[in-house]
Amino acid sequence: MTDTSAPNNQAHGLKDKVKEEFKKAFALTLYFGSWFCAIAFLAATALEERPIPLSIFGFALIKAGISAKFMLIAQAAYPIKISKEHGIVKSLFNESLVYIVIVLALNYLEAGLHGLIDGKEFIASMGAFGQGEPLRILALSIVYWLIVWPYLIFMGINQALGNTATLAILFGSKK
């Protein structure tokens, strides 16, 4: 008599894991998407662009999805570690800088790909990211860090307290 439940349990476990990863990616995409759409909207109004093209929001959401996936990959490669001795903020600060480097690298790649789509050279288009202005790139880095930082703090609290306790603190307990 053979036991066939082990492969079924593995398949069920894999299915649950994929479902959880999808939920994380979707939630993070919504989080990044709200920020990126707000920034795109601000940029369009600052440029006094009328009518505001809806395509910028589509690109913002695509960028959010890609950023979310890269963030999850970065977390898998460089997992969040909370030190009780240092606390959540101090423990996550260096990790936040690593994640910002990843987001910046993604932005450079995006600029290169956008240039290719427009018929320009990839490397030259990457160099044009942020209009090639170091101060602008620094400003973007700060904004991106301000976007990533609350997410990392949330993840640190979630790791320290558990998902149920974190959600209860933020949204009230389920009754």
Image (cartoon, rainbow, N blue to C red):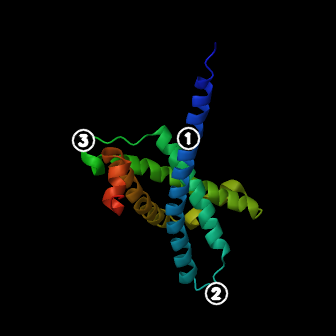
| Picture quadrant where residue 126 is located | bottom right
N-terminal of the pair, mark 1 or mark 2, is: 1
Q: Which residue is mark 2?
A: 50
Callout 2 amino acid: Arg
The answer to whether residue 105 shows anywhere in this view is no
* Marks 1 and 2, how far apart at CA: 46 Å
Is residue 131 toward the left or the right of residue 157 in the image? Answer: right
166 over 137 or under it: above or below:
above
Quadrant of the drawing holding the C terminus:
bottom left
Which residue is located at x 63 percent, y 15 percent? 2
Question: Which mark sits nearer the N-terminus, 2 or 3?
Answer: 2
Residue at screen point 62% across, 29% down? 8
Regarding residue 6, the answer to whether it shows in the image is yes
Say what amino acid the circle numbered 3 marks.
Lys
Between tags 2 and 3, which lies in front?
3
Residue 172, percent from left and from top:
33, 62
In the foreground, 13 or 140: 13
Q: Position of residue 93 (x, y in %)?
A: 34, 50
Disc 2 is placed on an element classified as: loop
Closer to the camera in the image, 41 or 102: 41
Q: Earlier in the sequence, mark 1 or mark 3?
A: 1
Q: Where is mark 1, residue-wise?
A: 16
Residue 91: give x, y in percent of width and height. Answer: 31, 45
Residue tagged by mark 3? Answer: 84
Q: In terms of depth relative to the viewer, which is nearer, 119 or 75? A: 75
Comparing marks 1 and 3, which lies closer to the viewer?
A: 1
Question: Is 146 displayed left or right of 119 in the figure?
Answer: left
Rate crowding at label 3 as few (under 14), some (14 to 19) or many (20 or more) other CA atoms within 10 Å.
few
Proximity of marks 1 and 2: CB atoms separated by less than 8 Å: no
Q: Residue furthest front?
A: 1
